[in-house]
């Protein structure tokens, strides 16, 4: 069955809807605006209750602010790497270190917006291990794989089609940098590149970042 992908930003961060035999959502935005999300889903002829799983690429605040609303709206289970379960359940807001001048600015802005964005913790249903997990049970041909670097617990949804939903393992475009590539903030840039390599080896063809537009995976290959 063909896979359909839809990108829709919730606040500052892209969420992606992936439709195969089942429906899953990747990431849950930086703002609490569930009504707008519901409208967008309805416009795509999606009944929110058909979304069975919400995969978090990682537990940063701008990926989980709308999570409790989305979980209520969809009834979907929540999955995140075990290292970041507590961030999600306690609504913690850690930020990684800065890599670029843009990163310094992004971190200051992020901290300001994070402080102003209030949301509660959300129970995690699946605490993902580093050996990853198949999405077949949710009607999607693909896997969630461990791709650390931006955070130690960062995960990528990698479909059999080569579509890779990487969260903040790569970012694309102003004001976070110029064009696709290294995230402006990350725990370890070398580990970011190791994870890029892993994704390329495993067949990633198109990168869907949480910030900015999708781009071809060979852009990352050239930056290794
Ligand atoms: Zn992040």
Image (cartoon, rainbow, N blue to C red):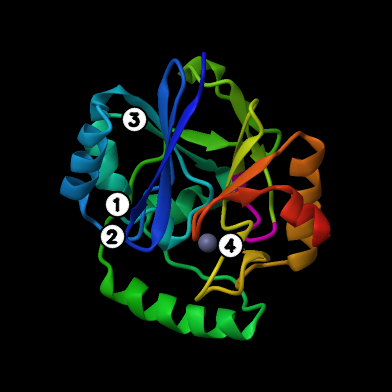
- First-in-chain label (3 vs 4): 3
Residue 154 colored magenta? yes
**Image position, residue 218 (x, y; %):** 76, 49
* Mark 1 or mark 3: whose residue is earlier in sequence: 1
The answer for how far apart the CA atoms under marks 1 and 3 are is 13 Å
Q: Earlier in the sequence, mark 1 or mark 4?
A: 1
Marks 2 and 1 close (CB-CB < 8 Å) = yes
Residue for badge 3: 76
Pointer 1 residue: 66
- How crowded is the residue under tag 3: few (<14 C-alpha within 10 Å), some, or many (20+)? many
Left-right relation of 57 to 189: left
Q: For numbered disc 1, what is the local secondary structure?
A: loop
Q: Is 62 on the left or on the right of 156, as rendered?
A: left
| Residue indicated by mark 2 | 31
Label 2 – label 1 distance at C-alpha: 6 Å
Report the residue at 64% width, 42% height from top. 206
Mark 4 — residue? Answer: 171
User: Observer-nearest residue: 168 or 132?
Assistant: 168
Q: Which residues are magenta?
A: 149-155
Badge nearest the viewer, 4 or 2: 4
């Amino acid at each position: 069955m063909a896979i359909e992908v839809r990108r829709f930003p919730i606040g500052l961060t892209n969420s992606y809807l992936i439709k195969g035999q089942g429906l899953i959502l990747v990431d849950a935005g930086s703002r609490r605006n569930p009504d707008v999300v519901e409208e967008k889903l309805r416009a795509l002829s999606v009944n929110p209750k058909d979304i069975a799983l919400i995969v978090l690429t990682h537990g940063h605040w701008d990926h989980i602010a709308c999570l409790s609303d989305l979980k209520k709206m969809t009834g979907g289970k929540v999955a995140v790497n075990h290292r970041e379960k507590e961030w999600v359940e306690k609504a913690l807001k850690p930020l990684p270190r800065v890599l670029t001048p843009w990163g310094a600015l992004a971190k200051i802005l992020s901290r300001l917006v994070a402080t102003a964005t209030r949301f509660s913790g959300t129970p995690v249903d699946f605490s993902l291990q580093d050996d990853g997990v198949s999405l077949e049970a949710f009607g999607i041909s693909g896997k969630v794989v461990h791709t650390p670097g931006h955070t130690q617990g960062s995960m990528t949804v990698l479909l059999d089609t080569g579509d890779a939903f990487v969260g903040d393992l790569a970012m694309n475009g102003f004001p976070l940098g110029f064009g696709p590539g290294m995230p402006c903030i990350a725990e370890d840039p070398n580990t970011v590149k190791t994870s890029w390599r892993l994704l390329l080896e495993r067949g990633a063809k198109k990168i869907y970042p949480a910030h900015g537009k999708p781009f071809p995976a060979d852009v990352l290959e050239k930056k290794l």
